[in-house]
Amino acid sequence: MAKFAPANTLNDLDDFNAKLDALSKLEALAEEFQHQKERRRSSRFVRSGVVAWRRGDIQAAGRAALRATEIDETNPTAFHLLAKYLERMGHTMKALLAFEKAYQLNPSSSDVLIDIGMTAFKLELHDAAMDMYRKYIAAEPNCALGYNNLAMAQADLDHVEEAIETLRGAIYRLPDQALLWNSLATVLAENGRAEESLVFYHEAIRLEPGSGSFRHNLGFAYQFLGQMSDALPTYDEAAKYCKDPIEVMEIEHSRAHCLLGLGRVEEGFKAYKVRRNERFRLYADVPIKAPYWQGEDVTGKRLLVIAEQGLGDEILFSNIVPDMLRLVGPTGKLQLAVDARLVTLFQRSFPEVEVGAYEDRAIRSEDLRQQWRFVPFAIQNGDPDYFVLLGCPHEWLRKTVDDFPGEAFLKPDPARVAEYRDILAKGGPGLTVGVCWRSMKLDTKRGKYYSSADEWAEIFKIPGVRIVNLQYGDCSEEIARAEKEFGIKIEVIDGLDLKDDLEGAAALSAALDLAISAPTASAAIAAGVGTETWILSACYAWPQLGTDHYPWYKNTRAFHPARFGDWKTLISDVAAELQKRVG
């Protein structure tokens, strides 16, 4: 009977180790085979995800990417696709982690560096973002993308000269890259140098004649310069060449503003309907069952009108409310949903209208971010017969500039108007001029459209003028600095919150002789109550509708410089007009 004999000699031990080595190699081959099998399965999901992404089915792409990472946790392409899905869905931090995972799995993939940089910048990790772009440039020195993204990040941080130098150096190295010419033009245009930008946009289009995006940007530059007649055909050309449906909507939106700016009101409002597309960036869904009003007869019906966009737009568009009230007639009912801060002011202004507040919420449904605008007060007794956004009825009721009534439509509280008039009267003689120089929401890009209080010296120092603050938000430091530097007094109404107490803002505006303001909610309120209002813009503004004023209101004048953002010249011109007004 055979017996088991332990390996107790050197030769037997060597033989045993050799067999173990062979077995280990066999196991490694089996593991590698299994990994390759998993990688192939994972890659099939990645490919199906990419196909879904390209056809616009982002949810399917995300599901495929997630399944691919579950099958093979070492597949860098799967994590890259998953990261792009997460970023599109608004999960920015999770996307950054997934991008970093993809890069760790494949450090030789320079493409991931760009995505890491872009995601980091969204998270305001600016140094990290620009570091990624510089690494990409080092890895791909002959690719325009790294230089472009680095320059755009520098420009967004207001390091404009650095951005220009980055792009100039890149163009010297890669003169045939249309993207770089376009980006240089954009940096120039957005920093008050639109005239210079034109030649660079034209060169980008020459190098890449099939680009709708470059033509879209050129149209913007023409608008900055007030050259609407040049901008419009440029937008039309852009739409012909553009294949991205999202950008086509943006082009149509720009084109609508251009048509309105040219005074082609009916065409402009028809094009402006693009914002009702659920894929448009400003779209907010309204969860009610009522059909959307398309101009049908609403006599005797209940019609819900919902304010849209910013606070100033809500006031601007509300010039249409009296017309809407006439449409439903005495047997119908008009409901109006507005910002909660406007409810009492609008209810007094339109006493026959039921006015209530809307509620905005961002809701996630299957990881898809959506913006919703709820109107609970309007559906307590069931849905209305129709609903419509406040700007849309202009398409049917404002076909020409002459259709705008040019009347005061906001009615402030008479008691508060009298109170503020009394306060102002105690300050002595002089023309009371309310001033507002900027929006409260300012980032680097928006800031270029507004001036600072420091630039208003010529207006502030005119004899016979008493400056009254209409600037909302925390502006105490700006006021103190202006008073000290210019030796003037800016009168502030104690206890009045100009941001949230819009009843008070309206009453104060009505008590003034004149308001001079940037195109903000302050300007809209002052103009809405009928106070003479001068609106100062960085460039020609589309709500002028081809005129030298804002036809939406009773008594306005519009001022803008010949050169975008040339506040020094503009303030000087306005000061000269104010001097004439004082006499």
Image: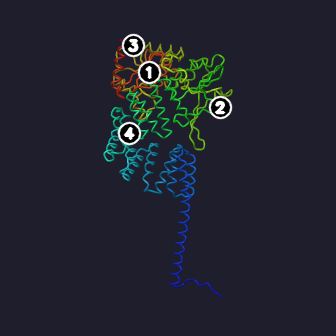
* 199 shown above or below 407: below
Sequence-earlier tag: 1 or 3: 3
Tag 1–tag 3 contact (CB < 8 Å): no
Badge 1 amino acid: Val
Badge nearest the viewer, 1 or 2: 2
Q: Count how many numbered circles sit on residues in the image.
A: 4
Sequence-earlier tag: 1 or 2: 2
The residue tagged 2 is 289
Tag 1–tag 2 contact (CB < 8 Å): no
Q: Is residue 229 visible?
A: yes
The residue tagged 3 is 430
The residue tagged 1 is 492
Q: Quadrant of the N terminus?
A: bottom right
Badge 4 amino acid: Ile
**C-alpha distance separating marks 1 and 3:** 16 Å
In the image, 532: left or right of 26?
left
Q: Position of residue 443 (x, y in %)?
A: 43, 35
Question: What is the number of the mark on residue 205?
Answer: 4
Sequence-earlier tag: 3 or 4: 4
Badge 3 amino acid: Gly
**C-alpha distance separating marks 4 and 1:** 52 Å
